[in-house]
Image (cartoon, helix red, strand yellow):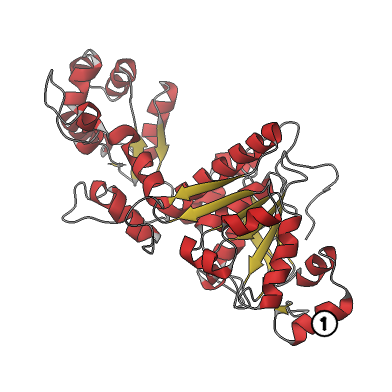
Amino acid sequence: MELGSSKAARGPLAGVRILDLTSVVLGPLATQILGDYGAEIIKVENLEGDLARDSGASLHQGMSSIFLAINRNKRSIAVDLKSPEGKEVLRRLISGADALVHNMRVAAIEKLGFGYGAVAELKPDIVYCAATGFGQDGPDRDKPAFDDIIQAACGLASVNSLGRDQPDYVPTLIADKTTGMALVNAVLAALFFRERSGRGQYVEVPMFETMVAFLLSEHMGGLTFGGLTSHNVPGKAGYARLLAGGRRPAPTKDGYIAILPYTGAQLSGFFNGMGRADLAQKYGGADRPTRNARLVEMYQDMVQLTCQRTTAELMEICTSRDIPATPIYALDELPDHPQIKAVGLIRRAEHPSEGAIRYIDPPIRFAASPATVRLQAPLLGQHTGEILREAGYDAAEIAALEARRIVSQSPSKV
């Protein structure tokens, strides 16, 4: 479905064609972002469709809330890649593609006949990006990987156990989505390299290693120095200020609030605003290492005060003193967040099969080449016919492929 003028709104990747052989969350989120940036995304699905089509809330089977959220700006072709004729369809599509992205296990796509070597023979300058669970140079290269597994393996579930009796997962698909963002960066960098050099390449984006790098960026701690305890450097990993606890949403008379007085001046401003000049002097006058060492104590004192005021009263104190603070927003309250409403992040559209829906507008703003939503998430095989025609198949050939269940097209209506 067209949303606005595609002629006037061409993103920075306009003219780039990407074959999307990904499924579930990691890969589809990444290719959607590339599509938002203007790339043409051809979503290659098997005849049963992406598993995410049935994950989340839904009005109709195959068009779940999660699928709708991460598969816009794509055209869908449904094809049996295990059949010789289906493989030929993909070969024809590869010849006209700039990039191919997949999140299959490497052994599986090699067996299918579309490993990097085979694809590069068809299109030598292609950017071939594989999203893997574990780096292919390590012993875990063939292990299955899902968000929970990676959260556990990379240390995130352990870090998230702070203040709890046992490790726990972060209740969002953080490994999938973080690795998806890394995949976007990798494809963009490889396309830029190809623009400069004319050369394509193989790119691997492993979930496990990406998440270890993500987590350790602040938690390397003593590992930075070989784990040795010297010159007051702790010997273990971890960012002590975070692991010591203390920081958490503070209770108010009518709810909860997040307050982060980060500097000495902000600490003084907060405690003075609460009528506690003694605490302003105690914490605001100290240097950063001393404040960090007393973090738990400081937040305990803060919580004793915040529960005496309403959230609105505390927000007024913080806003007038430029202290970072926000009410705690529930998921269902986000559409009414003043900032989100002002920038139009959550928009409404009429989906061709699902009717009126909400969707998230691209959050990144390009002044000269805006990111846009041109197509809503497709039905399974919605564009099979037109993609095959573009690849050189005539009407009779398409009908024969469909009759033999090599390809399928979506029904005219749900």
On-image quarter of the C terminus: bottom right
Name the residue rendered at 71%, 72% in the picture.
Answer: 381
In x, y percent, where is residue 384?
75, 71
- For residue 13, which quarter of the picture? top right
Q: Nearer the viewer, residue 295 or 71?
A: 71
Dot 1: within a 10 Å radius of its alpha carbon, few (fewer than 14), some, or many (20 or more) residues?
some
Q: Is residue 304 left or right of residue 131?
A: left
User: Which amino acid does the dot numbered 1 rest on?
Assistant: Ala
Task: Name, please, the residue furthest toward the right.
Answer: 395
From where the camera sits, is residue 279 visible? no
- Badge 1 is on which residue? 399
Task: Name, please, the residue furthest toward the bottom.
Answer: 403
Name the residue rendered at 68%, 45% in the picture.
Answer: 125
In x, y percent, where is residue 203?
54, 46
From where the camera sits, is residue 150 visible? yes
Q: Nearer the viewer, residue 218 or 406?
A: 406
In x, y percent, where is residue 12?
72, 38
In x, y percent, where is residue 55?
50, 70
Q: Nearer the viewer, residue 360 or 10?
A: 10
Element class at badge 1: helix
Name the residue rendered at 50%, 68% in the picture.
Answer: 56
On-image quarter of the N terminus: bottom right
- For residue 235, which quarter of the picture? top left
Q: Is residue 29 left or right of residue 271?
A: right
